[in-house]
Image (tube, grey):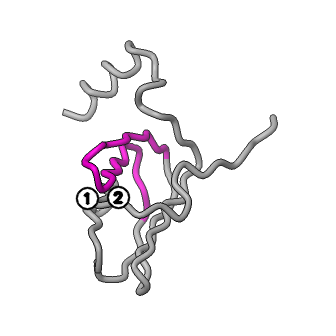
């Protein structure tokens, strides 16, 4: 099996990132306190400065918010929510209620 790495956002300036972690949802804004966390399966929402939201399903991984204001989300698997089959999307919505 061949794996590939991909950056969905690289050196992008965004307004907010909402990240599902084992400790709960973490909302990251500018000047957020440095922190680290372990991802749980869920949807990462990235809101750009124009208000456009991009949603990505992540399976697991880590997140870090650095003192310089940068944020890294490293995930084992990532799929754009818009690319997920509708039946799978519905099942995910039911399971996360």
Relative depth, front residue between 17 and 96 = 17
- Measure the alpha-carbon separation of dots 1 and 2: 5 Å
Occupied quadrant, residue 93: top left
For the stretch drawn in magenta, the main secondary structure is strand
Q: Which residue is mark 1?
A: 24
Magenta region, residue range = 38-59
Residue 21, image x and y in percent? 35, 58
Occupied quadrant, residue 63: bottom left
Q: Residue at x 29, y 66 (%)?
A: 28
Q: Is residue 94 magenta?
A: no
Residue 58, image x and y in percent? 46, 44
Q: Secondary structure at mark 2?
A: strand
Label drawn at residue 94: none
Q: Residue furthest bottom?
A: 67
Position of the N terminus by quadrant: top right
Q: Residue at x 41, y 19 (%)?
A: 88
Q: Residues within 10 Å of mark 1 (few under 14, many from 20)?
A: few
Residue 4, image x and y in percent? 73, 44
């Amino acid at each position: 099996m061949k794996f590939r790495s991909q950056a969905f956002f690289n050196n992008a300036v965004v307004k907010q990132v909402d990240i599902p972690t084992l400790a709960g949802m973490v909302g990251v804004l500018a000047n957020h306190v440095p922190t680290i966390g372990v991802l749980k399966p869920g949807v990462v929402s990235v809101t750009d400065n124009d208000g456009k939201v991009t949603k990505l399903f992540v399976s697991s991984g880590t997140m870090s918010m650095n003192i310089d204001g940068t944020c890294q989300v490293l995930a084992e698997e990532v799929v754009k929510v818009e690319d997920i089959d509708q039946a799978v999307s519905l099942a995910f919505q039911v399971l996360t209620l």
